[in-house]
Image: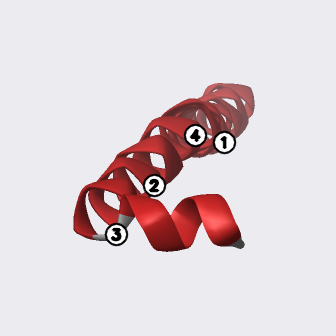
Amino acid sequence: MDEIKTKKSKKALSIYLIFFIIMIAFIAISPYIAMHNVEKKSKLSPKERIQH
């Protein structure tokens, strides 16, 4: 009985760990995505970007 409980808890822990890693990756990548979007906008209209 104890072995089954530890296996279940390990599985749950690994799922939480994967979710945690995905969240960290998303937080790490999001500024780069934002920078990429800003670069696209600046290429389209640099004059408008300076005025705003």
Circle number at residue 31: 4
- The quarter of the image holding the C terminus is bottom right
Q: Are marks 2 and 3 in contact (CB under 8 Å)?
A: no
Residue 43, given in percent of the width and then of the height, sits at 25, 56
Picture residue at 66% right of the left edge, 42% below the top: 16
Q: Are marks 1 and 3 in contact (CB under 8 Å)?
A: no
**Mark 4 / mark 1, whichever is N-terminal:** 1
**Structural distance between the alpha carbons of marks 4 and 1:** 24 Å
Identify the residue under disc 1.
Answer: 16
- Nearer-the-camera pick, 2 or 14: 14
Image vertical order of residue 8 relative to residue 51, above or below: above
Circle number at residue 38: 2
- SS under mark 2: helix
Circle number at residue 45: 3
- The quarter of the image holding the N terminus is top right
Image vertical order of residue 22 relative to residue 6, above or below: below
